Image (cartoon, rainbow, N blue to C red):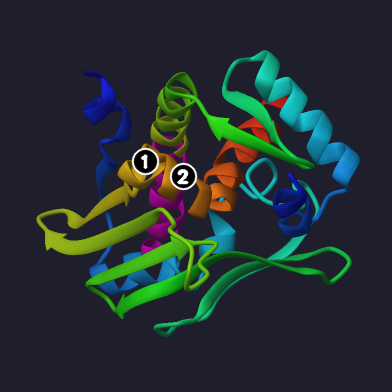
């Protein structure tokens, strides 16, 4: 978790809170190794992630298409 | 079992009604005009600008309203106007997911094919730890999107 907090431009408590919600949604598992908190994405989490990415790119590419065609007409 | 499906690359294909140079230019240099930064960015709703450094090894990053620079990706392959590959959150010792985009002229415009790959690295638990932060960018991105 410390690694995550160091990478993200949000506070450590915020990361902790987000992780708790992801855990409750069973998208990640948690275990302690000494003082470290190790989180792993579950297979269900990967499925969800992939589905989310699929939808995200579909939406984003439609937006890209609009922008590109508008630009093409302006030329 | 379902593992192959789970980790198969996300692929998309779309035809845009403009020439290839324009398509490539808008996808990269003008990414700020179409990327949904209001929901899908590190400083959601407060992104001033998105910059795409147009060279191999260049970075793609957002600049927040207060001037903070947050990296999204690193350019791995830069072949305008044919093809590009970028990696999210790349460190030399860390695995990441890759996005490849190909631009091909076609009747009516340009075919744009996108492949987002690298899921297999997330299934092996050793690699899992190495790609920790990368995977998390997406999970947290999803989380942020849900909140928005």
Label ID, residue B111: none
Residue lying farthest to the left in this orientation = B107
Residue pictured at 21% horizontal, 18% vertical: B1
Magenta-drawn stretch contains A64: yes
Quadrant of res B4:
top left
Q: Please tell me which residue lies in front, B16 or A43.
A: A43
Residue pictured at 67% horizontal, 24% vertical: A22
Q: Is residue B148 visible?
A: no
Q: Secondary structure at mark 2?
A: helix
Measured as percent of width and height from the top left, residue B108 is found at 16, 53
Name the residue tied to disc 2: B128
Residue pictured at 25% horizontal, 70% vertical: B83
Whether discs 2 and 1 lie on one chain: the answer is yes
Residues marked 2 and 1 touching at CB (< 8 Å): yes
Q: Is residue B2 visible?
A: yes
Quadrant of res B79:
bottom left
Residue B84 vertical placement versus A40 (above, below): below
Q: Please tell me which residue lies in front, B71 or B34.
A: B71
Quadrant of res B142:
top right
- What's drawn in magenta, residue-wise? A57-75
Residue B143 vertical placement versus B66 (above, below): above
Name the residue tied to disc 1: B124
Disc 1 chain ID: B
């Amino acid at each position: 978790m410390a690694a995550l907090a160091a990478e993200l431009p949000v506070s450590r408590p915020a990361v902790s809170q987000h992780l708790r919600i992801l855990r409750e949604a069973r998208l990640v598992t948690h275990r302690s190794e000494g003082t470290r908190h190790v989180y792993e994405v579950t297979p269900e989490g990967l499925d969800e992630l992939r589905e989310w990415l699929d939808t995200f790119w579909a939406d984003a590419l439609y937006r890209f298409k609009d922008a590109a065609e508008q630009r093409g007409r302006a030329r | 079992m379902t593992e192959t499906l789970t980790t198969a690359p996300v692929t998309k294909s779309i035809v845009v009604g403009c020439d290839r140079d324009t398509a490539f230019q808008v996808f990269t240099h003008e990414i700020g005009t179409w990327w949904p930064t209001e929901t899908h960015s590190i400083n959601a709703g407060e992104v001033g600008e998105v910059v795409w450094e147009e060279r191999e090894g260049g970075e793609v990053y957002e600049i927040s309203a207060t001037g903070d620079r947050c990296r999204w990706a690193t350019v791995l392959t830069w072949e305008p106007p044919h093809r590009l590959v970028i990696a999210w959150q790349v460190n030399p010792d860390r695995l990441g997911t890759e996005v490849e985009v190909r631009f091909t002229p076609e009747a009516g415009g340009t075919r744009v094919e996108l492949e987002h790959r690298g899921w297999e690295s997330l299934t092996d638990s050793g690699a899992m730890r190495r790609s920790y932060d990368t995977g998390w960018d997406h999970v947290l991105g999803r989380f942020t999107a849900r909140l928005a």
